[in-house]
Image (cartoon, rainbow, N blue to C red):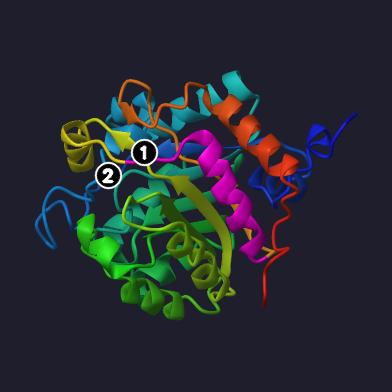
Amino acid sequence: MATLLDTGVKPYKHYGAYLKEKYAGQKVFKVIVDGNFTCPNRDGSKGYGGCTYCNVDSFTPDTARKIPSMREQVESGIERARKSYGAEKFVIYFQPNTNTYAPTHLLKMMYDEALSVCPEHTVGLSVGTRPDCLDFEKIALLESYTDRYDVDLEMGMESIYNDTLERINRGCLHDEFINIMKLLEGSKLEICVHTIFGFPWETEEMMLKYADEINKQPHIKFVKLHHLHIVEGSIMGAKYKRDPFKLFTIEEYTDFLAKFIPLLRPDIIIQRIFGIADKELLIAPNWGFPKSKIQTIIDKGLEARGVKQGSAYQG
């Protein structure tokens, strides 16, 4: 018997369906560019070593890591997206490290250059950053593009608990997230919040409370939900090798999402429900499947559990 999932309907509002509707069925693809940014907890401003779970290479494609010119990165990414996925429209995605961590005039030069490569087919700009690297001037710069592009500001909240943020060397407390969200009230930017589930000292009850914090912010349009994965080249990776700790299995993570997604405000669009790292860099958990298979397993698991986004939301 066919299910809703077989017809492309998922038990949550997902990004693919949103893009398909918004762009009248055209295939829209994110093109990752590396602006050679760093982070304040890497360069000594707030600390060294970065977040303990992070090795920036683990979420940056080889095509971005090995090409020095931003223009070449965009051209290469667009060509690959067209050939491999039949992409027709593109979102320029500044992903690695903190992509507002520079003077505003330099940010403008970089964003302008990346957006100038294929203007007739570029529909969006997505910028990944952290709460303590935004201010009124940088928000105004990003808003200046909204008359021509959809501008997605992706914010790393990671955890709502200051103890966790301190333990992972974040260099940024949750109050800073709350403060910047207040500054973004009424903004033309489309706000995306990134979370990580599975820090071994956080209980399930603690993690489910992330939904309450997200739901409080009416201007959050998107979320990215990630499970904690351990990668080579990270501080947490070195610790894990010495003394392994509990991480989600795919079944456990699906069980968790089946409790979390019903709590999430029903209008929020989920851009991603799990994280992925290059298999050469991934230490754990190794679920043993390619990305597309993991997506299918989780989606089918959520459907089998009768999940419906927002069904337990109390607004």
Q: Quadrant of residue 44?
A: bottom left
Q: Residue at x 55, y 79 (%)?
A: 186
Marks 1/2: CA distance? 8 Å
Q: Is residue 191 visible?
A: yes
Mark 1 nearby-residue class (10 Å; few <14, some 14–19, many ≥20): many
Left or right of 300 in this view: 93: left
**Above or below — where is 100 with respect to 233?**
below
Which one is in front, 176 or 113? 176
Q: Residue at x 39, y 32 (%)?
A: 285
Q: Quadrant of residue 235?
A: top left
User: In terms of secondary structure, what is the magenta stretch mainly?
Assistant: helix
In which quadrant of the rendered image does the C terminus lie?
A: bottom right
Q: Which range of residues does the magenta coloring cover?
A: 246-265
Left or right of 37 in this view: 293: right
Q: Provide the residue designation for mark 1.
A: 229
Where residue 16 is drawn, which disc sits there? Answer: none
Q: Check contact, mark 1 vs mark 2: CB within 8 A.
A: yes
**Above or below — where is 228 with respect to 206?**
above
Q: Is residue 118 visible?
A: no
Q: Secondary structure at mark 2?
A: loop
Q: Secondary structure at mark 1?
A: loop
Q: Position of residue 28 (x, y in %)?
A: 63, 38
Q: Provide the residue designation for mark 2.
A: 53
Q: Does the magenta segment cover residue 13?
A: no
Mark 2 nearby-residue class (10 Å; few <14, some 14–19, many ≥20): many
Q: Residue at x 28, y 69 (%)?
A: 162
**Above or below — where is 302 with respect to 178?**
above
The amino acid on which the numbered mark 1 sits, given as a three-letter code, is His
Q: Earlier in the sequence, mark 1 or mark 2?
A: 2
Left or right of 6 in this view: 263: left
Q: Position of residue 219 (x, y in %)?
A: 57, 72
**Above or below — where is 188 with respect to 129?**
below
